[in-house]
C-alpha cells in the first residue's frame, strides 16, 4: 500500500507545472473530445510507466539494497531541484494534431514523458519498492489526478493556481522525501 500511495503523491507532485500539463492544456484547446484526450493520456501513461516501473525493478536486482536508498533519495532531491526550472510549452510546433484527439494525445504524451521527471520518478519508485503493478497503478493515478482537471477546466485552473508556488511546494516535498529516504535505513 505504501508503494501505491507514495507513487500517486510523488507523480502528482512532479507533474505540477510540468510540460505534460501544458500539453494537456494545449490539446484541450485544440480538440472538442475531452474524453479522447483523457483516454490518450491514460494509455500513454500506462504504456510509458509500465516500462519505467519494470525498468526500476530490474535495475534494483543489480544494485545492492544498501545503495538503493541513497540512489533513490539523492534522485528525489535532484528531481526536487529540477522542479524549480519551469517547463516551456513547445507543443505548438508539433504536427501530430492530424491524428485526432486520442492519437495525438497518446503519441505526444508518450514522447513528452521520455526522460521526464515523472518517468524518472517512476523508475526510482520501481527500484525502491520492487513492485511493478503498485508503482504502475500509483504513478498512473498520479498522472491522471494532475492532468485530467487541466483537460476539463485547464484555463480556469491555470489562472487560479500560482505555478511558481506550486513548483516550490513540490520541490520542498521532494527534498523532504529524499532526506527521509536516505535517513530511513540509517535510523533502523
Image: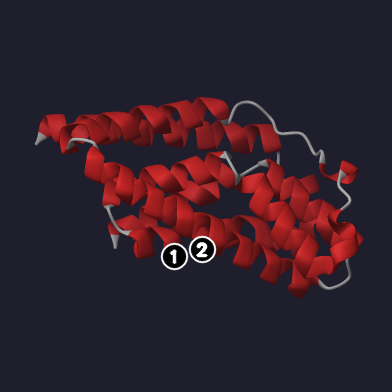
The quarter of the displayed image where residue 143 is located: bottom right
Q: Which residue is mark 2?
A: 141
Q: Residues within 10 Å of mark 2 (few under 14, many from 20)?
A: many
| Residue 127 visible here | yes
Q: Which quarter of the rendered picture does the C terminus lie within?
A: top left
The image quarter containing residue 107 is: bottom right
In the rendered image, the quadrant that contains the N terminus is: bottom left
Residue 137: image tag: 1
The colour scheme used to paint the residues is secondary structure
Residue depicted at x 36% and y 37%: 177
Q: Is residue 183 above or below residue 19?
A: above
Q: Secondary structure at mark 2?
A: helix
Residue 155: percent from left, percent from top: 83, 53
Lateral position of residue 82 relative to residue 138, left or right: right
**Residue at screen point 44% across, 35% down:** 174
Asked if the residues shown at circle 2 and circle 1 are in contact, with their CB atoms under 8 angstroms apart, the answer is yes
Query: Which residue shows up at 39% across the image and 49% down it?
Result: 55
**Position of residue 39 measured from the top left corner of the image (x, y, whole percent):** 68, 71
Residue 157 in view here: no
Identify the residue at image location x=61%, y=47%.
113
Find residue 62 and report its image quarter.
top left
As drawn, is 180 to the left or to the right of 65?
right
Residue 123 at x, y percent in the picture: 42, 45
Rendering coords of residue 105 (x, y %): 75, 60
Give the left or right position of residue 76, taking residue 182 as reference: right
Q: Is residue 77 left or right of residue 23?
A: left
Vertical side of 16 occupied by 72: above or below? above
Amino acid at each position: 500500500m505504501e508503494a501505491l500511495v507514495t507513487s500517486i503523491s510523488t507523480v502528482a507532485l512532479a507533474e505540477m507545472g510540468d510540460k505534460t500539463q501544458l500539453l494537456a492544456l494545449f490539446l484541450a484547446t485544440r480538440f472538442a473530445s475531452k474524453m479522447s484526450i483523457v483516454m490518450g493520456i491514460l494509455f500513454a501513461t500506462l504504456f510509458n510507466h509500465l516500462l519505467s516501473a519494470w525498468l526500476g525493478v530490474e535495475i534494483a536486482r543489480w544494485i545492492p539494497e544498501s545503495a538503493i536508498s541513497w540512489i533513490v533519495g539523492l534522485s528525489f532531491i535532484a528531481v526536487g531541484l529540477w522542479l524549480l526550472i519551469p517547463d516551456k510549452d513547445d507543443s505548438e510546433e508539433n504536427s501530430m494534431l492530424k491524428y485526432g484527439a486520442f492519437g495525438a494525445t497518446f503519441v505526444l504524451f508518450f514522447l513528452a514523458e521520455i526522460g521526464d521527471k515523472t518517468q524518472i520518478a517512476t523508475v526510482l519508485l520501481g527500484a525502491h519498492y520492487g513492485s511493478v503493478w503498485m508503482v504502475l497503478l500509483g504513478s498512473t493515478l498520479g498522472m491522471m489526478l494532475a492532468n485530467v482537471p487541466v483537460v476539463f477546466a485547464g484555463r480556469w485552473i491555470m489562472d487560479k493556481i500560482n505555478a511558481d508556488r506550486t513548483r516550490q511546494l513540490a520541490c520542498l516535498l521532494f527534498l523532504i522525501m529524499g532526506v527521509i529516504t536516505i535517513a530511513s535505513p540509517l535510523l533502523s
